[in-house]
């Protein structure tokens, strides 16, 4: 047997042994000698010399700081408004809320500001943003029917929201957006000073009443609300938002009870 034939048989035997051991893939084109000493470390380039600090330029103005608007700023601005007209002008001219940049209109209020009952909802939707008025879409039409059921309409009701600009995609306003607008809403209620408040929906109720539990835990019963730094409270009834009722008609019965309670409260206050 020649040497080449012997080497070929040895190689085949080794290959068969690899296959039997489960080796079925080559991981390199060249063999690796794991018994060889490790290569010497490569030399690294020296670190570059530190650059000298640039000379001071005393005549160059410092960059302007970006103003950050917070609830303290809106609280001071809202407190400076003595009338609803002042407040509306302040809100329309306010650029500190990012929602305004994506909205078409500022949605301030609708109805009669001298009304005995005031409805506060969540925020403008697409139709409200287009027309610049609260509750004019599908949920607004349902609200009109709800008010009519207790002898009210927009000439005897005042309507607003807890944010004055439509959130993109009709999403729920963020806690930061709600906190930023809250002083405006509190001043809005204080200046209107209705005899009865209706907080429509969980977002409005939880924001203004500063509660974290769901609206089903406290709707249907009277609570007292103090709108900011004032010396009076207003009775408030929290109830379901009309948009929720459109999705969950079975909850209309509870809302009807809430509205009847509002009607009786207004009558007891001489405003029925």
Image: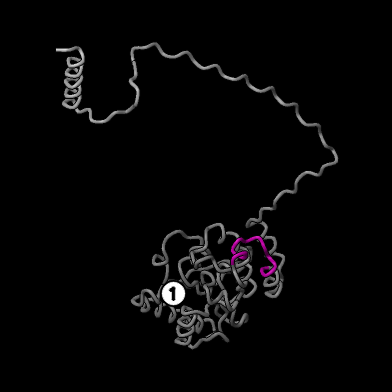
Q: Which residue appears at 52% of the width and 74% of the height?
A: 126
Q: Which residue appears at 71% of the width and 71% of the height?
A: 82
Task: Report the coloring of the rendering.
Answer: one colour
- Front one among 31 and 169: 31
Q: Quarter of the image for the N terminus: give it.
A: top left
- Residue projecting furthest to the front: 2
Inspect the magenta stretch and tell me whether residue 144 lies in it.
Answer: no
- Front one among 221 and 72: 72
Q: Which x, y percent locates residue 234?
A: 55, 72
Q: Which x, y percent locates residue 215?
A: 42, 66
Label total for image: 1
Measured along the vertical axis of the image, is residue 41 above or below residue 168?
above
Residue wearing tag 1:
243
Inspect the magenta stretch and tell me whether residue 100 lies in it.
Answer: yes
* Part of the protein shown in magenta: 91-102
Q: Which x, y percent locates residue 131?
A: 58, 79
- Residue projecting furthest to the right: 59
- Front one among 62 and 254: 62
Measured along the vertical axis of the image, is residue 153 above or below residue 206?
below
Which corner quadrant of the image does residue 182 belong to?
A: bottom right
Q: Which x, y percent locates residue 128?
A: 55, 76
The residue carrying pointer 1 sits among few (fewer than 14), some (14 to 19) or many (20 or more) residues within 10 Å by Cα, namely: some
Whether residue 85 appears in this view of the structure is yes
**Label 1 element class:** helix
Whether residue 195 appears in this view of the structure is no
Q: Which residue appears at 41% of the width and 72% of the height?
A: 244
Which corner quadrant of the image does residue 114 belong to?
A: bottom right
């Amino acid at each position: 047997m020649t040497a080449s034939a012997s080497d070929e048989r040895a190689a085949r035997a080794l290959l068969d042994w690899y296959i039997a051991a489960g080796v079925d893939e080559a991981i390199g084109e060249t063999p690796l000698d794991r018994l060889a000493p490790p290569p010497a470390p490569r030399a690294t380039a020296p670190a570059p010399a530190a650059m000298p600090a640039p000379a001071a330029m005393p005549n160059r103005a410092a960059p302007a700081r970006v103003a950050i608007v917070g609830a303290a700023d809106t609280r001071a601005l809202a407190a400076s408004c003595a009338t609803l007209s002042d407040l509306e002008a302040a809100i329309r001219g306010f650029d500190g809320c990012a929602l305004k940049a994506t909205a078409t209109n500022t949605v301030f209020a609708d109805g009669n500001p001298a009304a005995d009952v005031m409805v506060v909802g969540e925020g403008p939707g697409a139709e409200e943003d287009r027309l610049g008025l609260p509750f004019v879409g599908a949920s607004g039409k349902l609200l009109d029917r709800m008010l009519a059921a207790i002898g009210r309409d927009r000439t005897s009701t005042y309507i607003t929201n807890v944010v004055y600009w439509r959130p993109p995609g009709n999403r729920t306003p963020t806690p930061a957006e709600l906190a930023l607008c809250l002083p405006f809403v509190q001043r809005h209620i204080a200046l209107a000073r209705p005899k009865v408040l209706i907080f429509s929906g969980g977002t409005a109720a939880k924001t203004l009443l500063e509660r974290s539990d769901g609206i089903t835990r406290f709707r249907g019963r009277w609570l007292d609300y103090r709108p900011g730094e004032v010396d009076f409270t207003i009775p408030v009834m929290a109830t379901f938002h009309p948009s929720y009722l459109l999705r969950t008609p079975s909850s209309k019965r509870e809302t009807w009870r809430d509205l009847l309670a509002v009607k009786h409260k207004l009558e007891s206050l001489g405003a029925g």
